[in-house]
Image (cartoon, rainbow, N blue to C red):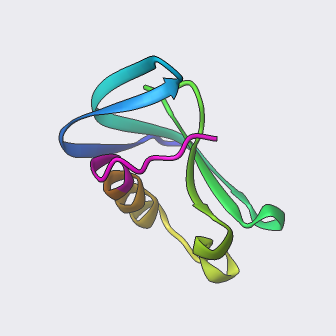
Amino acid sequence: MASHEVSLKASVNVTVQPANAVSVDSLTINRVVDLADQQEVRAWVREIPRPIVVWKGASYPANGGWNYDQVKAKIKADAEGGTLVLG
């Protein structure tokens, strides 16, 4: 599977574990998994050792209707808005 890169406007700090933040200016998506039974989409990126929760519960796209451009846009918006959720 090909990797997909998400370029950010500026570096953002991501807390991987309490008191363990990393600063990144881009994220390389290695894998995206749709857990339909749990209504959750997760993305694994090279720069962070834990998966990013892209959508979960009420925000989960109906019928699993998402594409990589939407995943990249959601990760970018969450990262730049300081609302990136790790699983």
Quarter of the rendering containing residue 26: top left
The answer to whether 10 appears left or right of 71 in the picture is left
Quarter of the rendering containing residue 27: top left
From the viewer's side, name the closer residue of 70 and 80.
80
Quarter of the rendering containing residue 77: bottom left
Q: Is residue 56 above or below residue 87?
A: below
Residue in the image at 63% along x and 58% along y: 41
Q: Is residue 85 above or below residue 65?
A: above
Q: Is residue 62 above or below residue 83?
A: below
Residue in the image at 69% along x and 81% along y: 63
The x and y percentages for residue 39 are 73, 67
Looking at the image, the residue that sits furthest to the front is 19
Please report the bounds of the magenta region as a residue range: 78-87
Quadrant of the drawing holding the N terminus: top right
Quadrant of the drawing holding the C terminus: top right
Residue in the image at 48% along x and 42% along y: 2
Q: Is residue 73 above or below residue 60?
A: above
Looking at the image, the residue that sits furthest to the right is 37
From the viewer's side, name the closer residue of 19 and 76.
19
Tell me how many marks there are: 0
Looking at the image, the residue that sits furthest to the bottom is 62
Residue 1 among magenta residues: no
The x and y percentages for residue 21 are 40, 21
Residue in the image at 59% along x and 38% along y: 51
The answer to whether 38 appears left or right of 45 in the picture is right
Looking at the image, the residue that sits furthest to the top is 20
Residue 86 among magenta residues: yes
The x and y percentages for residue 75 are 41, 52
The x and y percentages for residue 71 are 46, 59
